[in-house]
Amino acid sequence: MKLLEGKNVIITGASRGIGRGIAIAFANQGANIAFTYSSSAGPAEELEKELKDKGIKANAYQSDAASFTACQDLVKTILEDFEQIDVLINNAGITKDNLLMRMSEDDFDKVIEVNLKSIFNMTKAVQRTMLKQRKGSIINMSSVVGIKGNAGQANYAASKAGIIGFSKSMALELGSRNIRTNVVAPGFIETEMTEKLDEKTIAGWRDAIPLKRGGTPEDIANACIFLASDMSAYITGQVLQVDGGMLT
């Protein structure tokens, strides 16, 4: 028996990296996938085909998670296509790193909009459906940076810390209707983005992690599978650090 058999899942920002890893792992567990991308049409089409080849229903949607109206329209369309939404994974995110003295107002605003406001937009958009169903699991992607901060990432850290506060509030608001809200906080995850960094930097990071390796998108996906499945039916309002012991 697959853990997510027949569940309909929305994943934002899934055309690459962690989001892509989650989509593939969820499809392997029998979930139907509605995923969004902002501009990477080619990778999104490839992923849609790969997911469909696994025998599940999968659709890619171009959508701007930072836009309230776009999120309302997106969820309306997904409901027409899938009829029900069981799981929402808010994964869309960007970075615009800089020390505060060099950070522009636009760099701050944009990161807050895409990373934090998108959580409000999407939760608001699926809320009515999940309330009617009297069930649902919402998983919000934060970061260890949202817990401990990081020099040069004030905007990113603020957005990821905000996600934790928002999620805990939603756990309290929506819990009586059997809607669970949890947070996954990844540590150093090796994706195509980290491949651009020099090997020495990466080796230094790996060495500082108790498990002596960077995480993989599968490591994050496995935590999400647990939180999306009925195995975590009594868990809400929690932050699960998937960081190899980085913040221990």
Image (cartoon, rainbow, N blue to C red):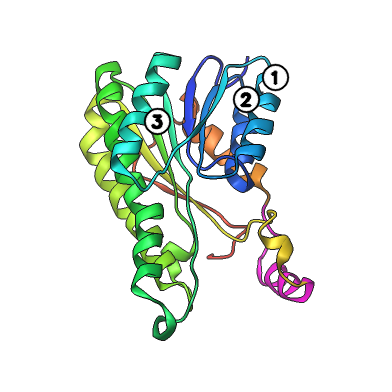
Residue 198 magenta-highlighted: no
Q: How many numbered discs sit on the rendered protein?
A: 3
Q: Is residue 126 visible?
A: yes
| SS for dot 1 | loop
Quadrant showing the N terminus: top right
Q: Is residue 212 visible?
A: no
Q: Which residue is mark 2?
A: 27
Residue 206 magenta-highlighted: yes
189 lies left or right of 36: right
Residue span colored magenta: 199-215
Q: Are marks 1 and 2 in contact (CB under 8 Å)?
A: yes
Q: Residue at the location (66% across, 58% down)?
A: 193
Q: Amino acid at mark 2?
A: Ala
Q: Which mark is residue 54?
A: 1
**Where is residue 165 drawn, in percent x and y?**
29, 54
165 lies left or right of 239: left
- Examine the rendered structure and indicate whether residue 100 appears above or below residue 88: below
